[in-house]
Image: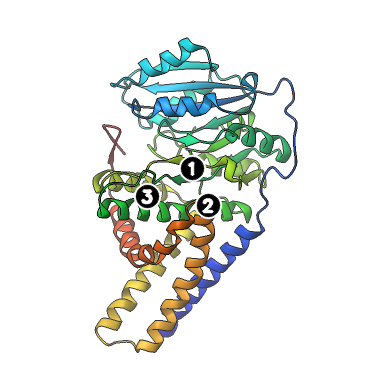
Amino acid sequence: MMYLLGMIVVLYAMLCLWLCWQWSSMHTLPTKKVALPPDFKLTLIVPVRNEAENIGALLNDLTQQTIRKNHFEIIIANDASTDDTVAIVKKFIGSKVLDLQLLDLQDEAVSSPKKRAITQAMKIAKGELIVTTDGDCRMGEKWLETMARTYLQTGAKLISGPVCFSTFPLPPTTAKRAFAIFQTIEFASLIGTGGCLIQAGLPTMCNGANLAYQRQAFEEVGGYEGMDQIASGDDEFLLQKINQRFPDAICFLKNQEAIVSTQPQPNWGAFYQQRVRWASKWAVNRRVATMTVAIFVFLVNLVTLFLWGELLRGGVEDGLFLIILLLKLLPEFLFLALIIHFLGHKKWIVFIPFVQVIYPFYVLFFGITAQRKGYEWKGRRLR
């Protein structure tokens, strides 16, 4: 029994080292200067609902983009906001500093509001490259330019960009600071793993807060057709559809100038709803690679908890337990440190062991609760 558990951990350690190799061998894109054709245009689609606290900062960031204004347009797809989101967007439209449109959607009972918002925005979009982000995101001035040049250099049908949680300013209390740092490190593991799997030709994960795809590719795969009844997954299911139609045409944009940041969840309730929403995509995903990753990660962390239990009851020798534990923790730490450093949070590397201790409990909890249907998001009950 212990031999089998040890082999599972060894396999996990080898996987972590493989991820480290994939990340280290990944090129920074674009690898050369690429001129934008005079008629090139991209469309940035931002689905929003009740983002009055954040949308102004996002639009300010977009006014600072280094890409020329004639090369991009912005569509804010407003999903029946009940706060001042619309008023703020209209003020920016009136200033004429951006090629900005407001698409107002009615408050209708739909299975996937975000997919609806993007689909409706696509009908009026003019760009050949579609870029998506969220209303609570922030980005650097070279974000869109880097996306555009990467698309033109690689010819990729879909580009997955890096996303991180911004912990600045830190929450006022120690408990909330620890919670924010935990989310930052845990989320970084998802972004890094998704990027490495794309690099290896096994695209499994991406994030709609920083995503770009060719308009023609979106249309050729039928957009969200066939998955529009699933509330979440506008990003990962589209990734899989495009990959099936265009193998080897997906890339991960490993470039710090392309990082998009968003805020961690402020409390446990919001965090719970967000993670159940994310996990719900995995619960309905039947792709072999995706299922394999989910099951293996769950199994490894279940083994870790089992070993801790065996140690406490004296069922395993201290030395053997330590060897197995280090086989899991050291390669895992190395991979997380690489990603955290890239995302600009190297001061949080010292907190990785804290996350490694908590993570098995987290995985077990959400692995079970994700089987429940339905969650609250943006004031709505979704399935």
Dot 1 and dot 2 residues touching (CB under 8 Å)? yes
Q: Amino acid at mark 2?
A: Gly
Residue drawn where x is 54% and y is 37% of the image: 211
State the residue position of label 2. 194
Q: Secondary structure at mark 3?
A: helix
Query: Percent from the top left, x then y, of residue 59?
Result: 47, 25
Residue drawn where x is 52% and y is 26% of the image: 62
Pointer 2: residues within 10 angstroms few (<14), some, or many (20+)? Answer: many
Determine whether 330 is above or below 129 in the image: below
Q: Secondary structure at mark 1?
A: loop
Residue 279 is labelled as 3
Q: Does residue 350 appear in this view?
A: yes
Residue 207 is labelled as 1
Q: If you read the primary sequence from the N terminus, does the residue marked by circle 1 or circle 3 appear first?
A: 1
Dot 2 and dot 3 residues touching (CB under 8 Å)? no
Pointer 3: residues within 10 angstroms few (<14), some, or many (20+)? Answer: many
Determine whether 373 is above or below 215 in the image: below
Q: Amino acid at mark 3?
A: Ala
| Cα gap from disc 1 to disc 3, whole angstroms | 13 Å
Query: Percent from the top left, x then y, of residue 268?
Result: 25, 49
